Image (cartoon, helix red, strand yellow):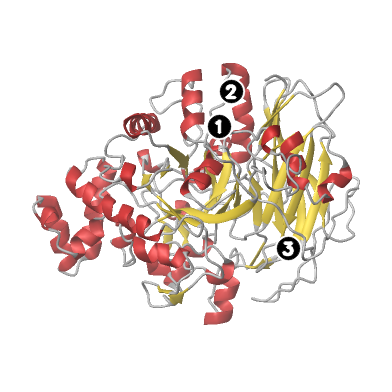
Amino acid sequence: MRKATLLGATTALFCGTVSTAQDVRIQPEDTQFGKQHYSPFVDQAFPNRVFWGDTHLHTSFSADAGMIGNVLGPDEAFQFARGEKVRATMGEFAQLVRPLDFLVVADHAENLGLAPMISESDQQLLRSKWGRQVHDLVKGGDPISGYLMYIEAISSNTDPLNDDELAKTYWNRIVDSAERHNEPGVFTALHGFEWTSANNLNNLHRVVMFRDGADRVQDLVPFSSYDSSDPEDLWTWMEAYEDRTGGKVMAFAHNGNMSNGEMFADVRHNGQPIDAEYAERRARWEPVYEVTQMKGDGETHPLLSPDDEYADYYTWDRGNFGSELKTEEMLPREYARTTLARGLRYQEELGANPFKIGLIGSTDSHTSLATAREDNFFAKVSLVEPGTGSDRYFEYAVQPGSIGEAISVQAYETAASGLTAAWARENTREAIWDAFKRKEVYATTGSRMTVRVFAGWDFEPDEVFRPDFASEGYARGVPMGGDLFLGSEGQSPTLMVRALRDPDGANLDRIQIVKGWINANSEPKTKVFDAAWAGDRELSETGVLPPVGSTVDGSEYTNTIGEAMLSAHWKDPEFDPAQQAYYYVRVLEIPTPSWLAYDQDYFGDLNLPEDAVMVQQDRAYTSPIWYSPKD
């Protein structure tokens, strides 16, 4: 068996990115460590740092935030992400344990800035009959009726304002805020917005993220669902932006668990089957996927992974946003693990993989506060921030809708998730965006554990402990997000993995390898392998690793179990060189209290239902490495 290994607290891990967006793979000549100079770092070009951020945060400029209480705008969002103390909408002060490195304020494109327009009695808004009505309702003390007018408009896919100049004005305010707070090398404020397609209340939302500065993105009219609900039209808009400006842009889908099988459907939005052109376009414009966030975790589902005891993590599976209950046949088209395997089948059939996605995490918070720690959770929306009483737990996160209570989700079921880690060489817009493009990124459910993986053909077991682990990994293998092609006869892919705990968080439980492949009948298959673990546990005869245990006592826990660092050298024991496959790493922390446990300790008995999660295990999901038998 491979036992976990604890290295000294001073052990350094490696993190980073390359210099251009097109460098998908590191070239051996770029890793000239110690070959030309006495200093071994003179020509070093591979990514050597990890940067933490949230790429999906809403402020008061989103109507479904600002019109239901949030008064914090983009400036406060960036200030908070940079580590400053901010007073939240409902009065509590909030601050991060450590600043983030990057942030995307991704406000909804649909009637962007409506709430501040109303607050400021914007004259351009008041010239619109609809705008005047909404304004007067809110100013007259009936904000709910005003908000419902907005919901009616967005549900009808008809823009009630239809004013490009107004949209530009408030988009440019967000752009200006990002420019004020962007500080290359210290903090990266990326420009972006959310396109909010939701046909029949099925969530097909995408965040659009730019590589560029204000010189290219100012005066845009963000593409909205009023323009089209078809993601292919969004891609066309993105392509036109690049052609017009010479800039760079990408999109990434929300977690698909609220899409009722449409996020990764086998047909296009127009009902036609997926073809090679569609597959190539989707792979180009949507290189990564938001696998975890507050509205539930999207890695896998217990029915899709019945042998995975950790599959049921904040599972939201009752339906969409209120119009249709979930059925089991929808699940394979919603969760990342199965979707990645289905993508391999498309690669076989079409010669292109529409679902060749890296994995990221985001909050999707509508409070302007990027909080994903269990002990610092400021909720999905401002109305249920800390101190709002029972509403914080029992307000609807998903309304009953036309289906009734069977489809509803309450706020206590919300996950305190997630964050993205990007391996890059410097903290700039270009370097962070490029890391996303080449998929050298990974998701966590809120913890800031450091994880690195390389796959190759000739890594030896002790190489995972080398001080030049990363140099060798890039020179002789590929990192997360990379492609591995057929090696010499008789070889199996070997993965080297290092994981280091969050310095302000919990010890690690285990490193797991998740493998997906297509069998001889072209059926997608997946399997989880335990590769390294803490303590003296041993695998059972059936390959099951016992739990690490728990030190949780209410809102407290100790790091007397688990290990601060785990390392794994894992060779695929079931490798078939003729089969396409993917591999990604899942790292689990030891059990810790949930945000509900911290709340109960702070506010007193909450009278929570029996299914309330009081103890949970944060985790990381790396972007996959893909194996193909042919280049």
| Circle 2 Cα neighbour tier, 10 Å, few/some/many (<14 / 14–19 / ≥20) | many
| Three-letter code, disc 3 | Ile
The answer to whether 249 appears left or right of 300 in the picture is left
Q: Where's residue 293, x and y in %? A: 52, 53
Give the residue drawn at x 58%, y 40%. 439
Q: Distance between the residues labelled 1 and 2?
A: 9 Å
Image quadrant where residue 628 sits: top right
- Residue on which the image places disc 1: 355
- Residue on which the image places disc 3: 590
Q: Decide which of tag 1 and tag 2 comes sooner along the chain.
A: 2
Mark 1 and mark 2 residues within 8 Å of each other at the beta carbon: yes
Q: How far apart are marks 1 and 3 (CA)?
A: 31 Å
| Three-letter code, disc 2 | Tyr
Q: Where's residue 550, x and y in %? A: 76, 68
Q: Decide which of tag 1 and tag 3 comes sooner along the chain.
A: 1
- Residue on which the image places disc 2: 346
